[in-house]
Image: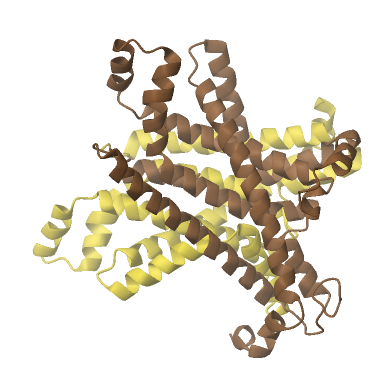
Amino acid sequence: MIDVLTDNFDRFTAGLWVTVRLVGISFLAAFVLGTLVAALRVAPSRLLQRIGGVYVEVFRNIPLLVLLFITFAGVRRGGLDISAWTAGTLSLGVYTSAYVAEALRSGVAAVSVGQVDAGLSLGFTHRDVLRRIVLPQAFRTVIPPLGSITIAMIKNSAIVGASLLALPDLLKEARIVNSNTFQTTEAFFWAAVGYLLLTATATAIFRTLEARYAIRR
Amino acid sequence: MGYLFDPDNWEWLWTGRNLRFLLDGFVINLQIAAVAMVFALIVGLALALLSLARFTPLRLAAKLWVDVFRNLPLIFLILYLALSMPQGVREYWTENAPEILPEALRGELVLAGILGLVLYNSAVLAEIMRAGILSLDRGQRDAAAALGMTYRQQMRLVILPQGLRRMVPATVSQLITLMKDTTLVSIIAIQEVVRSGRQLSQIAGNPFVGGSDVQAPILHVMIFIGFLFVLVNLALSRLSRRLEVRQSKRTTGRRVPLSEEEQAVAVAR
C-alpha cells in the first residue's frame, strides 16, 4: 500500500500542487467576478439587476464540463489560441462566481435597510454605501457559505483535470500512476487522501476565519 | 464574435438528424439523473437517520461515511468505480440488464456511473436532511415524546415531515447539481449528450451520427447543449418553488423558512 505512495511521491505532490494552484487562481477569479455580479444584482437599476440575474441563472445551471468544452475546444476551433490553464481557471472561476454572487447577495440582504438609508442620508453615493457599509458586513456574514463553495471548487477542479485539458492535476497523476503500476485501488486511495487533506485544510481555514470575523445573526 | 453568430456555423442544427441525435443523448442524461435521484434520496435519508442514531458507534460510522464521500470529487469516484469494477459484475449487467432500459443504460460501465452518482449525492443529501432535522425546535420532539409516541412515531409523524420540508430548496439545488453531473459519465464512455456532441463535431457526414455533411463547430454544439441544461434546470427550480408555495398553503401553520444564510450554505454544496 505505502510503496505506491513512496515510489510515486513526486507525481502525487506535483499533482496536488497543480490542484492547489488551479483552485487558488480560480478562487480569486470567482471572488472578483462574483462580487461584481452581486453588486449588479443589488444595483438601483432594473436592467442591471436583470443582467446579474441572467448571469447567475446561466452559469449555475450549465454543467462545468460543457463550459470547459466551450472555453477550450470551442474557442480554439474558433481560432483563438487559448491555453489549458487559462481555459481551466476561467471555466472554474466563472462557474463558481455564480455561486459566490448568490451567497453575497443573501449576505447583502442580511444587512438591514436602515443602514443603507442612514448611509444615503449622510450623503454617501450608492456606490460608497455598497463599498464602505454593506459589502464589508456582507463578506463577514457569508464566510460559512464561501467555505462550502471553496470545498465544492476543490472537488470541481478534478473535472478540469479529467476533461480534455492538459492539466496534470491530482486526479490525472493518480490515473497515470494507475496505468503505470496497475494498482488501481492504491493509486486512487492516495489521491483520495490528497483531496481529503485539501478539503480538511479549507474547512479549518474557514472555521478560523469564521471564529475571528463572522457576524452572528 | 463574428464566428459565434455566423449563421453558417449554426446550419448543422437544422440539417440531417443532428438535432435528433443530440436530443437522444440528452434523454439518456435525464434517465440517468432520474434513476440516480431516486436512489440518492432513499440512501440519503437512511444515512441521515443513521447519523442521528442514538447508538454511538453507528452514529460515528455513518458520519465518517458521509464526510468521506461528500468531500471526494464525484468524477474521482466514477473513474475509480469504472476502473475497479470486477469483470464479472460488468458481464452480469450487460447480459441481465432489464430489457425495458434503453440500450445506452445497458452498457457495462453504466453501473459505475450510477453508483458513483448515488454514493456522492446520497452523502450530500444526508447532510442536508440532517441539518433540516436538527434545525427543528427541540420542543417538537419533547412534545411528541410527552404524547407517548415511540422514537419511530416521533420521526415519522413529527420530525421528518417538518425537517425535510424545510430543506426542499437545498435538496432541489442538489438535484440540479446531480442533473449537471450526469455529463461526467461521458468520461467513462456512456453515450450521453456531451459525448454525442463531441462525436457530432468530429465526424461530419457520418450516417450513424448526424447524417449531415455540414460541419458542426464544437463551440456551437456545446453552447446548444449548455442551453438544454439551463432550460431543464430552470424548470426544476421553478417546479420546486411552486411546490413550496402549495405546501405552505396546505400546512397553513407558521412555516418557519430557513434563513438566507442557511440556504446559501446548502446551495453552495
Q: Residue B10, can we see it?
A: yes
**Quarter residue A217 falls in:** top left
Q: Residue at x 19, y 68 (%)?
A: A125
Is the N terminus of chain A in the top left, top right, bottom left or bottom right quadrant? top right
Which chain is the one coloured yellow? A
Q: Quadrant of residue A122?
A: bottom left
Up-down relation of residue B13 to residue B40 (above or below):
below
Chain that is brown in the image: B
B133 or B73, nearer to the observer: B133
> Measuring 35% from the left and 44% from the top, which residue is drawn there?
B247
In the rendered image, residue B266, in percent from the top left (x then y), is placed at: 44, 42
Q: Quadrant of residue B225?
A: bottom right
Outermost residue on the front side: it is B100
Provide residue A141's location: percent of width, then percent of height: 32, 44
Q: Residue at x 59, y 52 (%)?
A: B179
Q: Is residue B198 above or below residue B166?
A: below
Q: Relative to A176, is A105 above or below? A: below
* Colour option used: by chain
In this rendering, position of residue B59 left or right of residue A52: right
| Residue lying farthest to the left in this orientation | A121
Q: Position of residue A115 (x, y in %)?
A: 15, 54
Residue at the image point whose x is 40% and y is 31% from the top: B161
User: In the picture provided, is A7 more to the left or to the right than B223?
Assistant: right
